[in-house]
Amino acid sequence: MTWLNKINPTPAFPPYTGPYKVGSVDVEIPTSQLESPGKLDSPSTDPATVSFRVFYPARPESEQKGVRWIPSPQKEVVSSYAKFLGAGNAMADLFANLPQLLYYIKIPVHHNADILEPPTQSKRWPVTIFSHGLGGSRNAYSHICGLLASHGVVVVAPEHRDGSCPVSFVNTPEEKEKLKRVEYKKISHKASTEVYDARDEQLRVRLWELGLIHDALLKIDGRVPLKNVAEDYKKTGGKDMLTMLSRILDVHEPGKISFAGHSFGGATTVQFVKSVYYHNATGPKSYRPLFMPNEDSNIIRQITPQTPVMLLDLWCLPLQSPSTVWLRNKPLPCYDSPAGGSSLLAILSEAFYKWSANLNDTKRTVSKPTGSAAKYPDQPGPHIFYPVASAHLSQSDFGVLFPWVTTKVFGAKEPERVLRLNARAMLQVMRNAGIEVAATSKKDMELQDLEGLDKGVPQDEEILSHAEDSVRGWISLRTELNGGKSEVSKGPGDAMVEGEALGQVMSNEERGTT
């Protein structure tokens, strides 16, 4: 079958590199079954459900089929992506009705497989919540999520209903219209009062959803009965997938859940952990919080200075809103501890590294406090890296599924390796935070014929090293601000995954994008 795979024109994912098989379940829970996560009113676009895909280590005998990368209803999803990328309504509908190889792409997970019993000391699996960027979905970062899951991490990938997906469908079985569409909101990438207000409203939805998902995880682990209305649930044959995940998730001990996100998802992650951590701090009258957890909320105990925070190609414009400038100027929670930035990771694409305005804003966001604001002056700063010849979409599924696009159009190289480097760094940050994950494989470490490493490397210190050429093409950055102008690539570029041409998105060095 190997030669058949080579001539198969359908884009396909590479295999995961960790020691575990990966299972996946689609979850959608009515918000009526979850506790309100915050003091503020729910967002004006409060959806009836929260939706997320879970990637998890599966039992070795699992042989279930994969999951369709383009979810149902496929034609409507493909049509929405085409519109998102600039096609008119008629062209998008025509494209969606043509025979599509896209419809046959499968995420190489085992659909609704039994979860593996954790071999960890706690007898629980570590959990990471991964927030997607503009143009993303619960499926659009499946490879990085699956890589982490293959190394012993349960990854929860929300699908935000803030208008950042090309389209999202809300299941409402009790209503006549069972599937409600949440359309993409086209908002300018150039900073203005209107843009800040619109992005603030999207963040309100996103933070609200993260609070609800955290409550859902606690209830799932506590075996509280919850209704899963996701379309995939109908294919389980009556199998209760949520009960399967109970008593096995490390979501109760403070600081154990990791938070990660790409682009707008990175901004969401920063805003969420800060909003929770500084919930009791008094800001000026000009500060209008987007999320305020209830005093008795379990999320308050979960976010600690030890909480791993991992930001992939952080997009900083949503953090610049005048309404939240007070929060923006607060350091990330990790700096309230002598360990400092050891649990903080920022990975840029080379394209975002060359975008000086956003690079400097990223450095300001993740840097440790200085002067009188420094509680622990000798604490370490963050881990910041970028892989050479990488594009913004290199950290999503688009890079590995369509390598000819990333190479010919964006100038990116080795998309599969770029994602493995990302996963290596994320896993090592978790290890440094005391979270037990599997050893990094010899393949990921790029080691040849070394005895005694058949099970991988338990501590991947090289990936976080600041030494030059410690890992090929993996560049460590300092937090000093860069001078000069932004370097702009030619042609349609790295923001394709957000439906914008790079020439439009980055034509002005101070312009915001994602």
Image (tube, rainbow, N blue to C red):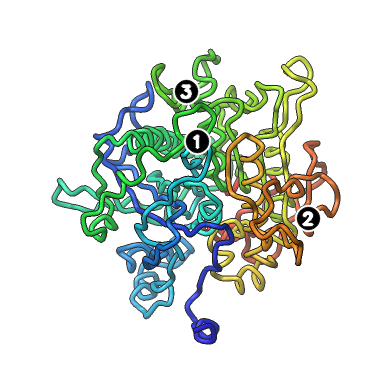
State the SS at label 3.
helix
Quadrant of residue 408 in the image?
Answer: bottom right
Find the distance from the CA under tag 1 to the CA under tag 3: 22 Å
Residue 391 in view of the camera:
no
**14 left or right, relative to 98:** right
Q: Where does residue 274 sit, x and y in percent of width and height? A: 55, 27
Mark 2 — residue? 471
Mark seen at residue 300: 3
Closer to the eye: label 2 or 3: 2
Mark 2 crowdedness (10 Å alpha carbons): few <14, some 14-19, many ≥20: some
Residue located farthest toward the front when viewing the structure as drawn: 452
Of residues 62 and 352, the one drawn nearer to the viewer in this rendering: 62
Label 1 sits on what residue type? Ser
Mark seen at residue 206: none
Q: Where does residue 383 sit, x and y in percent of width and height? A: 72, 40
Q: Where does residue 509 sit, x and y in percent of width and height? A: 70, 48
Q: Where does residue 81 sit, x and y in percent of width and height? A: 43, 63
Nearer the N terminus, badge 2 or badge 3? 3
Label 3 sits on what residue type? Ile
